[in-house]
Amino acid sequence: MIFVPDTSVIVDGRFSAFMEENAGATVILTEAMLAEVEHQANEGRSLGFAAIEELKKLRKMSDDGLLTIEFYGRRPSEWQIRGAREGEIDDLIRSAALENDAQLVTGDQTQRDISVIKGIKTIYLEHPKKIVRNIEEFFDNITNSVHLKGDMPPIAKKGLPGKVETVQLSYKVGERDIEAIASNLVKRARMEQGSYLESDMNGATVMQLRNLRVVITRPPFSDSVEITAVRPIKKTTIEDYTLADELKTRILSRSSGVLIAGAPGAGKSTFVQALAEWISANGKIVKTMENPRDLQVSNNITQYTALEGSMEKTGNILLLVRTDYTIFDEMRVTSDFHVYVDMRLAGVGMIGVVHATRPIDALQRFIGRIDLGLIPQVVDTVIYVENGNVTSVLVTESRVKVPTGMSQEDLARPVIVVSDYYTGKDMFEIYSFGEQVFAVPIEAAEKVESTVSRYAKRELAEEIRKRTGIQDISIDHLDDHRMVISAPEDTIARIIGRGGSRITELEKQLGLKIDVEASDKPQERKIPKIDIRNRIVYIDTGIPGSDTRIFVDGVLTLQAKTSSKGIIRARISTETGSAIYSALKSGRRIEFSAERSEKE
């Protein structure tokens, strides 16, 4: 008998098991199938490595005289390999079976149906019922994750959220063992019910194996093959958490925008699973958006992943299926936050999961990603999970008010007020000041006021120096709505601008009143001696070791410390040296002021 296997039965090991029952047969391995396997392995994909291990088994069976291997066909073109998902490789394999009057062996239903339609003799291999297990051997009933790396003792994390211990197991796993475990995991993900390959990328494979989320990494992404398996060890219900009935009603009675926040390993996923089950049990249609899909929820909650690699496309589909609530686990990149906002504004109840070390940090993840004024519309509740428990609940509200710590009425602006749900106490205010957004702890308003002050002083100084070129200024913050600029008297007109236009524009930009006054103790300016030799400008002040400022027509052009002979050198090839040289040649006014260094 002659058999032609396709890639599906090579990858998951079904064909080698099939050949153990058909000793003496001839196996035709097509160049098309070999090229696809090679391409997968070269791309660092676990499917390719799993297939190579199976092909090695077939070669050994041939060397032992159990079967005969022949190679057939031509190596496919690059475009055919790229088009493997569109059936180009499968077509070449079918043609090989037809041309050799052989039986095609496949585990792919579509391949089987097309072969039958074409009149090709076909054997369809069902998934084997008995699977050799491996990764579960590293788990006990309190283990939530296992980390395997070649020639290293396995690491296990054990315990409930907040009480997790890292334990080193007492034996090593060799490089070959890691490859064998990885190969078997890929097969199982393709065959076992409730399991699937989430993604297989260059150097990283993500899969869901029943209740285990498994990540396999290999070069070039990681320095060696590594396997990480994670599972929930406790399934909770909403009654296990101290949520007030009023809060449950708040979430359930309207399409809410909720964030579940917490540090990695804090128990966010466990809580959101319980929340999703509770919402579903109350007659709401609940869907999830996950990448990877690892939430452990009941079958009446459909789990979606990134459609064609895009969560935006997934969101578009969810709008069509008329879901009441969507669980978005986890939001990481900017596009995820945009999808959350779009769906929330469309009226869908959204429950997003984000990493955050403080409750307020969850809201700050939105700042800069969406318009500030939209935040209360899309996120009305933040639930913070720590050590497996809900430790804080914040709610948001938009108000027009003078920010806490300021008193001038004309500084009123839209402010997002973040309050503690249970006490009703205002905890934070989020608002824009100039071009900066501040999240202000209300209890520390005076400290935040100094932060705003420093920001405003820095912005004001930068704007004046950029617009006028005047460097010799100082700025003082008089109160919550007024600043004063001190500058040499002969520069004040330029700072104010024609008819006060420049100051008026800056006041509008920063939302502050700005006064300008002459410096209390203007430094005396003198005329230096200047000499030019070998394309170097020598500025002789006669004051050794002093902090010196050089002015051209009143504009600060150079700041430097003089030498022990009171001289500053500037090469004409530099920007400042060129400016002083040009000023000297054109007869412009060059002056200096000097202060003795504190060390002098």
Image (spheres, helix red, strand yellow):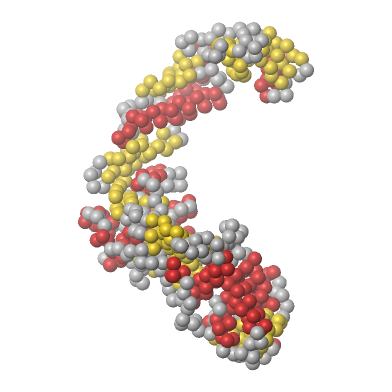
Image quadrant in which the C terminus is located: top right
- Please give the name of the residue rendered at 69% of the width and 69% of the height, measured from the top-left corner: 78
Q: Position of residue 131 (x, y in %)?
A: 47, 78
Instruction: Report the residue at 39% width, 47% height from top.
Output: 357
Relative to 21, is 348 above or below? above
Q: Quadrant of residue 5?
A: bottom right
Q: Position of residue 109 (x, y in %)?
A: 53, 82
Q: Is residue 84 above or below residue 437?
A: below
Q: Nearer the viewer, residue 16 or 417?
A: 16
Residue 600 can be seen in this image: yes
Q: Is residue 225 left or right of residue 64?
A: left
Which residue extends farthest left? 245
Residue 305 shows up from this direction: no
Quadrant in the picture for the N terminus: bottom right
Q: Is residue 60 left or right of residue 143?
A: right
Label tally: 0
**Residue sticking out furthest to the bottom:** 1
- Between 545 and 436, the one nearer to me in the picture: 545
Q: Residue at x 55, y 71 (%)?
A: 180
**In x, y percent, where is residue 37?**
63, 72
Residue at horizontal 52 percent and vertical 70 percent from the top: 181
Nearer to us in this view, 533 or 419? 533
Instruction: Tell whether 241 sits left or right of 450.
Output: left
Residue 599 point in image, percent of width and height: 54, 14
Going by the picture, which residue comes out furthest to the front?
A: 170
